[in-house]
Amino acid sequence: MKALTLKQIGISVLSIPLACQIIFSIILYTNVTNTQKTVQREIAAKSFTVTIQKLVTSMLERVLSIRLERHNTGANLVAEARTTKNSLDTIARQLFSYDGLSPIAVARLTSVVNKWQTTEKQLPLVAFDTSNPAILAKVEQSVSTIFSEINLVSNEVASQGRAASDKNIATLRLVRSYLYAALILSSVGGIFLAWLVGQLAYAPISHILANAAAMARNKELNPLNSGPPELMAIDNALLEIDRKLHHANSRQHSLYQLSPAFLLELSENGKIIKGNEIVSKWLDFQEKKEFFDFFEGAHRLRLESQFELARESKTRKVFQLSADNLLAFPSHSQWTITWNDKSHSYFCVAHDITDSTNIEQLRDQISRYLTIELGAPLKTIASLVAQSKQITLSEGRESWTNKQLAAISNNVERLTNLLNQLDHSTDPRNLEQSSQGVCSNKIVINHATEAVRSLAQAKGVQIVAKVEWSMVRGTESELERVLINLISNAIKYTPKGTRIEVLSTPDKNDMIRFAVVDQGSGIPEQARHEVFAPFKQLANAKTVDTPSTGLGLSVCKTIVERSGGKIWVENSKDGGASFNFLLPASTAGSPKLID
């Protein structure tokens, strides 16, 4: 049997009482209409009886008026009695207006009227004494017949009135019975409908709620056997979600155990609640100890303080730990500590970063070595260029030579600044320093574009600057370094004959936005978060002629973030790359102008 849908249940629940109400209303209306007709019939019968009485009275008054006329007694009474003839005719006509008379009664009334007219003509001839007994007997017989037939008609109409009254009473009793029956049926029907709704709708809904509560308590769910299709679908979806959650939990448990990271849950007092397999490899559990007992001295104090800070601040704490004295523990590890208020426990994640730390240290050493080794030759070249410029000036040589020497001097100065900034960015003592100072975005962009103008001209690339003048927070030399790196990279990857746009406009929250937009091939979305990593080069970097160390964008990121801003990359509308960074605006300086 096909299950009823919720829509069908709703229609049934609404249509059943509606149909019963319509049927009861029709029955009640029919009986009330019949009652109205019987009441009208009863009233008409009583009215006809009154008319009969008026007719008899008028006949008697007419007889009386004729006797008065014969004896000439009471002129006023005679005049009043004479008016009864007209009223008698009117009353006789009213008798036939009653539509409930049978054909026999109509014939009798017609006979009464005819006989009365004949009798009325004979009445003046009657002396109302024994002098003319034949005529008197005939009149008496005629009058007796008239009153007899009037009585018969009156009895018939009275019988009809009594019948109408009885029928009216019976109908009212029937209506009362219908009311009682409707009350009983509505009560029973309401109970039945409530039971029907409970069986068809509420029971499945209650079952679904019970399953949801069981899911919240991680208990087993029971499938719904029958019910509306919509509720069956909800219950099936709930069971499917529960199945996937169990699968995900089991998989998560497997991943938890097999994770290469150090995963550990600790109680508030430092006892180990749960850990994955790597925990037993990093820690020696031959002796039963609490977690902090595996560490000594400064290492233990550092761990305890970080765990305590995570619990008090309710925030995640990330720090690094070097522990060369622990045999099984990594030399360098990065820790993430999170406090859970509900379970009152710590969740700890630690990664082995020994190899990456060693590589970073090696890179820093190489960078410093290059800085030292290249710094001395550059100083020598700068000194020789300065001497050559003085010689050319003293000898009055052509201005072309001076321009070339000036270009060489600028590039030597640029290389020197690059080495200084490379040493500055790789020195751990400078990582926490913040850039101080205020500079003009227009001046910084002008200096940066002039520094790379020769590179752009050599490749046939046009540089277009669109600047809305503002003062920004930061060191002028560092911001020039950022723009020079970004524009130089854009020149490398921009096809010949295209252009590069350098933009600077105010942004929201009192920030100034800088953008370097090229018309190259763009940067894949999955690689955009990697381009700012130190020594990181994309695949298309190998296709350019100019070699790269992979430090330029990393230095840009360091400078921008030290200045209180942020830097990111996205593809422009034309498909090229758009390197953007924000710097805080400064209210120092002249009023804002539009260049």
Image: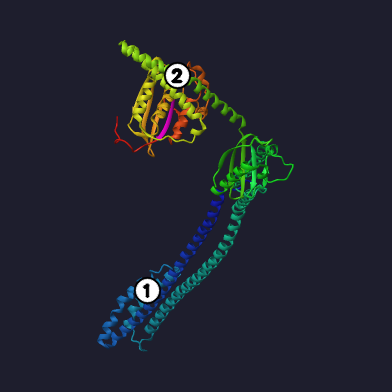
From this view, report whether residue 571 is shown above or below residue 381. Answer: below
Given residues 555 and 300, the one toward you in this image is 300
**x 39%, y 76%: residue:** 50
Is residue 240 something that shows in the picture?
Answer: no
Of the residues tagged 1 and 2, which is closer to the observer?
2
Dot 1 amino acid type: Val
Q: Are marks 1 and 2 in contact (CB under 8 Å)?
A: no
From this view, report whether residue 328 is shown above or below residue 291. Answer: above
Dot 2 amino acid type: Leu
* Label 2 packing within 10 angstroms: few (<14), some (14-19), many (20+): some
Measured as percent of width and height from the top left, residue 464 is found at 35, 23
Disc marking residue 419 = none
Is residue 589 something that shows in the picture?
Answer: yes
Tag 2 secondary structure: helix
Horizontal placement of 315 versus 471: left or right?
right
From this view, report whether residue 198 is shown above or below residue 116. Answer: above
Tag 1 secondary structure: helix
Q: Which residue is mark 1?
A: 113
Counting every numbered tag in the picture gives 2
| Magenta segment, prevailing SS (helix, strand or loop) | strand
Q: Earlier in the sequence, mark 1 or mark 2?
A: 1
Instruction: Confirm whether the magenta stretch covers residue 582.
Output: yes
Measured as percent of width and height from the top left, residue 462 is found at 37, 19
Distance between the Cα atoms at labels 1 and 2? 154 Å
Q: Which residues are magenta?
A: 575-583
Q: Which residue is mark 2?
A: 378
Instruction: Confirm whether the magenta stretch covers residue 475.
Output: no
Measured as percent of width and height from the top left, residue 178 is found at 54, 65
Given residues 380 and 229, the one toward you in this image is 380
* Label 1 packing within 10 angstroms: few (<14), some (14-19), many (20+): some
